[in-house]
Image (cartoon, rainbow, N blue to C red):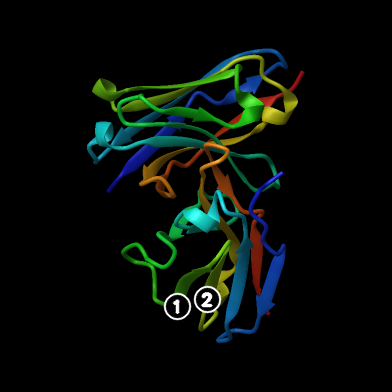
Amino acid sequence: EVQLVESGGGLVEPGGSLRLSCAASEFTFSRYSMHWVRQAPGKGLEWVSYISGSSSYIYYIDSVKGRFTISRDNAKNSVFLQMNSLRAEDTAVYYCARARGATSIDYWGQGTLVTVSS
Amino acid sequence: QSVLTQPPSVSAAPGQKVTIACSGSSPNIGNNYVSWYQQFPGTAPKLLIYDIDKRPSGIPDRFSGSKSGTSATLGITGLQTGDEADYYCGTWDSSLSAYVFGTGTKVTVL
């Protein structure tokens, strides 16, 4: 069974940084594109970023461009989200998720909570 | 501000049918496949429907999807109390170069 396990969340002050990690297993990681999706408390799903299997294609939602960086290490079956200049509105549960083609997301991690507060 | 619009809530009695509409535009639903996700409180979303009308293994055929123009619809027949959850549509937006989710719909079984 496909497994995605996020880590790295926590409490950080505004302007601070965090690096989220997602460890993938039970599938050929390099063949799949990956997403980060977040959900603020009591709110809906918001897509954050996408990276293709070879890292050739990378996309971000406008609100995080210039602040967040997605990357992956196919040798370690891991995808990362480096988050800098964090704001209160970045507070959310962050999910790592596997892409199924361009229009679907077929597996999700359990999520990791990021809280930006002083 | 989501580019895909859903009704905030729908409800029906057990055994009945509900439909959830997802309204978009040409760069997203109009020219791409649509997926649907089910989310229970405190848990990760789960893929329910992909490529407009396909069900992953293990998803009962009570769940169905369709698309017409720039709108998509999720149908749930034989409604059960265990179907009470939030449902989201999603697809790629070719103009934004971004994945977009619907605003979400809460299904309540009366």
Distance from label 2 to label 1 (Cα)?
6 Å
- Label 2 and label 1 in one chain: yes
Q: Secondary structure at mark 2?
A: strand
Q: Chain of mark 2?
A: B
Residue at image location 60% in from the left, 17% down from the top: A66
Q: Residues within 10 Å of mark 2 (few under 14, many from 20)?
A: many
Observer-nearest residue: A68 or B67? B67
Q: Is the residue under label 1 in contact with that under label 2 (CB below 8 Å)?
A: yes
Give, as a three-letter code, the residue at label 2: Ile
The tag on residue B62 is 1
Q: Secondary structure at mark 1?
A: loop
Residue B82 x, y percent position in the rendering: 53, 71
Above-or-below relation of B38 to A46: below
The first of marks 2 and 1 along the sequence is 1
Residue A26 x, y percent position in the rendering: 24, 41
Give, as a three-letter code, the residue at label 1: Arg
Q: Is residue A6 left or right of residue A101?
A: right
**Rendered image quadrant of residue A90:** top right
Observer-nearest residue: B67 or B31? B31
The tag on residue B76 is 2
Q: Is residue A41 left or right of residue A102?
A: right
